[in-house]
């Protein structure tokens, strides 16, 4: 799993690439928290376009990110999920908590 | 149900083996000619079951996880994930959405996802003796 990011005017976009499972979760959370500490963004976009596989570990990651961003008054979106990650997002019902955008829209 | 083919896989409860387990089952299931969505569902269910064994059955130690995949009656894939770990004291509670004892790195959605992606899910567990998760998914023949 690789984590990339782009920052623009208070909004941090985080790109996940590869397969996200429990094996990858700790390292991924650490890199994402490092990015949030560095940029202190107001809003956050989690772009799953490069994710070829995600299990419920991804739900834990999104919930953690959601708590942190909304806790400081920001907003968070998840976008670009391919078919398999999207089925996991749907089955979890996380769209009741976090805005899931499919397909990618101009934010 | 008649068993036509199977694989058995045994590995230590190390998280690096999660990807191996789902890839092995996906390669085995390919002979049923599943759609990409069906294959994605199967890989996800394997990942959830194996992760549970790794994280919850053997929290402080490395134990053994046994995985079996079988083809039954030519169009059913049966998956069995077994451990000899600490067991689940209350299976009904563990199957509730959002229930987890795994801290904030776990979502508590593992069994919910297994249930929604597979046709049948059976969990048998004895505290101190281990857990066996059996799942069944029909892969309809495509003409």
Image: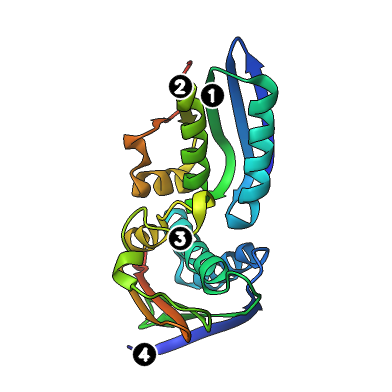
Query: Is label 4 on the same chain as label 1?
Result: no
In contact (CB < 8 Å): disc 3 and disc 4: no
Q: Circle 4 marks a residue in which chain? A: B
Mark 2–mark 4 Cα distance, whole angstroms, equals: 53 Å
Quick check: can you spot residue A80?
Answer: no
| Mark 1 surroundings: few (<14), some (14-19) or many (≥20) residues within 10 A | many
Identify the residue at image location x=63%, y=13%: A8
Mark 1–mark 2 Cα distance, whole angstroms, equals: 6 Å
Q: Circle 1 marks a residue in which chain? A: A
Mark 3–mark 1 Cα distance, whole angstroms, equals: 28 Å
Measuring from the top left, give residue A68's x and y in whole percent.
51, 31
Q: Is residue A21 left or right of residue A78?
A: right
| Colour scheme shown | rainbow
Q: Is residue B95 left or right of residue B65?
A: left
Mark 4–mark 1 Cα distance, whole angstroms, equals: 51 Å
Mark in the foreground, 4 or 1:
1
Measuring from the top left, give residue A71's x and y in whole percent.
46, 27
Question: Which image quadrant is residue B51 in?
Answer: bottom right
Q: Is residue B77 above or below residue B111?
A: below
According to the picture, the residue beneath numbered tag 3 turns out to be B101
According to the picture, the residue beneath numbered tag 1 turns out to be A44
| Mark 4 surroundings: few (<14), some (14-19) or many (≥20) residues within 10 A | few
Residue that lies at the very extreme toward the bottom in this rendered image:
B2
Q: Is residue B48 left or right of residue B121?
A: right
In contact (CB < 8 Å): disc 1 and disc 2: yes
Question: Which image quadrant is residue A34 in?
Answer: top right
Mark in the foreground, 2 or 3:
3
Q: Circle 3 marks a residue in which chain? A: B
Query: Is label 1 on the same chain as label 2?
Result: yes
According to the picture, the residue beneath numbered tag 4 turns out to be B2
Residue that lies at the very extreme toward the top in this rendered image:
A9
């Amino acid at each position: 799993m690789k984590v990339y990011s782009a920052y623009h005017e208070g909004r941090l976009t985080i790109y996940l690439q590869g397969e996200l499972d429990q094996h990858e979760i700790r390292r991924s959370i650490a890199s994402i928290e490092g990015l949030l500490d560095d940029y202190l963004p107001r809003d956050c976009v989690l772009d799953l376009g490069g994710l070829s596989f995600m299990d419920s570990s991804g739900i834990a990651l999104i919930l953690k990110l959601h708590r942190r961003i909304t806790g400081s008054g920001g907003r968070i979106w998840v976008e670009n999920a391919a078919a398999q990650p999207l089925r996991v997002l749907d089955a979890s019902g996380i769209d009741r908590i976090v805005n899931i955008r499919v397909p990618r829209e101009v934010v | 149900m008649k068993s036509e083919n199977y694989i058995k896989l045994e590995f230590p409860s190390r998280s690096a083996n999660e990807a191996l387990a789902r890839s092995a089952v996906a390669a085995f299931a390919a002979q049923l000619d599943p759609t990409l969505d069906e294959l994605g569902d199967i890989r996800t269910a394997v990942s959830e079951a194996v992760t549970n064994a790794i994280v919850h059955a053997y929290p402080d130690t490395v134990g053994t996880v046994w995985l079996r995949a079988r083809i039954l009656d030519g169009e059913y894939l049966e998956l069995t994930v077994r451990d000899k770990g600490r067991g689940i004291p209350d299976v009904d509670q563990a199957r509730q959405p959002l229930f987890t004892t795994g801290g904030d790195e776990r979502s508590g959605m593992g069994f919910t996802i297994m249930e929604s992606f597979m046709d049948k899910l059976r969990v048998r567990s004895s505290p101190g003796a281990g857990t066996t998760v059996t799942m069944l998914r029909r892969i309809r023949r495509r003409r």
